[in-house]
Structure formats: C-alpha cells, structure tokens
Image (spheres, grey):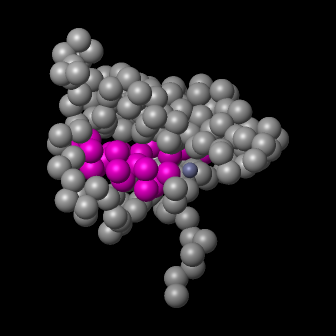
Amino acid sequence: MSDTTATPTRYVTYEQLTPKQRMVLDAAEKNMELAYSPYSHFRVGASLLAKDGRVFPGCNIENANYTNTQHGETTAIANAYAQGVREFWAMAIIARGETFDTEVPTPSCGYCRQSLYEAAQVSGNDIELIISNTMKTKVLIISVHELLQGAFGPLDLGIDVSKYRTLKRSGESEI
Ligand SMILES: [Zn+2]
C-alpha cells in the first residue's frame, strides 16, 4: 500500500502561474475573507472562471446544525448557475485557519469533487483547479477529472448535458 498521506509533488509557485491563473487565485483569496465559519474557524475561498470571462465568487457558509454547511466550491458553482452561466475554464481554491496558515494546498472534499464533476460534464470540458496554500507559495494545478477519476455523472444516466449548457437570455423564454 502506498502512503495515503503522501502529498503531491507537482506544486508550482504563484510566480509560475499565468496572469489569468493569478487573477482567479487572487479573487479566491479575497473571497476567503468572506467565509462565514464560526464553528470550524476555517476559511475557504473559491473563484470560478467562466468561458465568458466572468469570475464567480464562493466561500464556505456554516450553519449551527453543521449539516447545512455550504462549501466554497459549491457556492461558486451556485453563484454561476444562478446567473445562467454553466461553462467554465477554471476554479481557484485557497484556505486558511483563523489562527494558522495552511502549509500545503487544501484539496477539495469528496462532496465538492462530485459537484465539480457534474459542472465539468455540463460545461463540456474538464475544469482546471488552481489550489493554493494560504501564502500562495505552493499551488497545485490539477483537473477535476484527475481529482475524481472514474466518477459517476449525468452522462451515466444518459442525460444529454448539452441541452443544459447554454441558457437562453432572459426575454427569450418560451414560457
Ligand atoms: Zn467541500
């Protein structure tokens, strides 16, 4: 068995990122400060880069019952979907504790990986993840499909996801 605590060795630094990757990560860093996390005291910021160039914010939002807690990655997806945007290039994710900085990039949890996988299938392409430690000295570049291999998604249910990809603009509704 391999060591399950082994960390990836393919980190890059902030300086090695492209200007667009830096822009998305910088946005996620700002969003991290918007986290509502009175219970875990752990802040997660996300930002989702759409194909139209827009960037959607996400952060973790906790709840006293714990179960209703929302995660940074999924709130970013929800923000985009709620504005009719479902095609994406990349998402940046960064985290910190209230009293400590993360030394290594905090990987997305299983729940978020599944949501990202669905978003990637609907988008019609894999989505690049830019996952950083707090100080942006270690950044992991990995794709959703790499992070969640062999996953279950809408295509397994025979869903024609292309129908859900591009939304009509308001005013073009057939209702
Ligand atoms: Zn999560």
For residue 101, above or below residue 49: below
Q: Does residue 60 appear in this view?
A: yes
On the picture, is 175 further left or further right than 141? left
Residue 121 is one of the magenta-drawn residues: yes
Q: Quadrant of residue 174?
A: top left
Q: Position of residue 171 (x, y in %)?
A: 23, 11
Q: Does residue 13 appear in this view?
A: no
Q: Position of residue 61 (x, y in %)?
A: 66, 37
- Residue at x 43%, y 37% (from the top left corner): 77
Q: Position of residue 16 (x, y in %)?
A: 42, 39
Q: Quadrant of residue 48?
A: top left
Q: Which of the pair 128/8 is nearer the observer?
A: 128
- Residue at x 52%, y 56% (from the top left corner): 111
Total numbered labels: 0
Q: Which of the pair 129/59 is nearer the observer?
A: 59
For residue 10, above or below residue 21: below
Residue 157 is one of the magenta-drawn residues: no
- Residue at x 57%, y 75% (from the top left corner): 4
The C terminus sits in image quarter: top left
Q: Residue lying farthest top?
A: 171
For residue 25, above or below residue 52: below
Q: Residue lying farthest front?
A: 175
Q: Position of residue 35 (x, y in %)?
A: 67, 32
On the picture, is 116 further left or further right than 8? left
The residues colored magenta run 112-136
